[in-house]
Image (cartoon, rainbow, N blue to C red):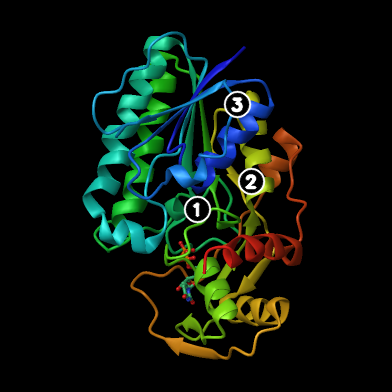
Amino acid sequence: MPRTVVTGGAGFLGSHLCEQLLERGHEVIALDNLSTGSTDNIDHITDPKFSFIKKDVTDYLYVRGPVDYILHFASPASPIDYLERPIPTLKVGSLGTHKVLGLALEKKARVLLASTSEVYGDPLVHPQTEEYWGNVNPIGPRGVYDEAKRFAEAITMAYNRFHGVETRIVRIFNTYGPRMRLNDGRVVPNFIKQALLGEPLTVYGDGSQTRSFCYVDDLVDGILKLLMSDLDQPCNIGNPAEMTIKQFAEAIIKFSNTTSKIVYEPLPVDDPKQRKPDITRARQRLNWEPKVKLEDGIAKTMAYFKTKV
Ligand code: UDP
């Protein structure tokens, strides 16, 4: 039975990954410092192959016994969260990734790093291919996340080349689904919460900036395919169905049958103007592509948020 460590295992993506790994027969050890994650996301897991340890992976990291895989998902991930926690965000991406790679070296485990479309910054190449090096403002407010993840990719490749550690890097594009925090500030929980409460949907800027939204089940499927593949170069996983934020607000209004209107608020600093993954590599190397339609994914997410508002 493979033994797998998931850092950030009590978070939105981490908890879904833990469940899928258990389903596939892994023993799973979830680590989380619960700064943005919550045991609410894992309390329902009764599988005896699952354990949880409250742990900040920025500190010394040791796990008893053999480890076959490590999925490094610990990090604040919403712009509001990393703006409120700039130094922990930088530390978990840098020091935390170093600790994870050290554990992998010691245990001869394969590591999968959760990287992000934010490594492309405000992209000048569209859609974004893995070959694009990005356009990041290192000293802007989002730089704490973007640069931490860029450093994390660099040290991951260094451990791969210098120490021969088996590594995988997923660049995750905007993802949504149950277990996102209602108040994490991202556009999906904000709009759904506002629609459910009949409040105006807050579109930042003129709403012409674009994003491409992937449902969590599709994302997890792609990540686990990448983990089991032999691809050690970064791989975009996301849904290429691009839309403007204004169109997204209109879609949420339609799907939820709400009377809410749209209001416009200032655009955050360095907010990327466009974002859409080129998923050719994932299609060719992993035989993966997203399947869940926006309407269906939003319906499931809305059902979850109805229990939370
Ligand atoms: N956004 C918005 N209204 C909100 C929250 C976000 O218009 O209430 C916009 C935000 O400015 C960005 C997009 O939605 O252009 C996606 O924002 P999010 O915070 O979800 O993630 P990002 O893709 O920027 O990391």
Q: Confirm or reject: label 1 Cβ below 8 Å from ligand 1.
A: yes
Instruction: List x then y, in percent, for residue 190.
Output: 50, 72
Check the image and report above or below for 93 versus 216.
above
Which residue is located at x 27 percent, y 60 percent? 84
In primary-sequence order, the first of circles 3 and 2 is 3
Classify 10 Å Cα crowding around label 3: few (below 14), some (14-19), many (20 and above).
Answer: few
The secondary structure type at the circle numbered 2 is helix
In primary-sequence order, the first of circles 3 and 1 is 3
258 lies left or right of 112: right
Residue 33 in which image quadrant: top left
Instruction: List x then y, in percent, for residue 152.
Output: 37, 37
The secondary structure type at the circle numbered 1 is helix
Query: In this rendering, which labeled residue sits more in front, label 3 or label 2?
Result: 3
Instruction: List x then y, in percent, for residue 114.
Output: 48, 40
Q: Which amino acid does label 1 sit on?
A: Ser
Query: In this rendering, which labeled residue sits more in front, label 1 or label 2?
Result: 2
Please give the residue where the numbered disc 1 appears in the rendered image. 117
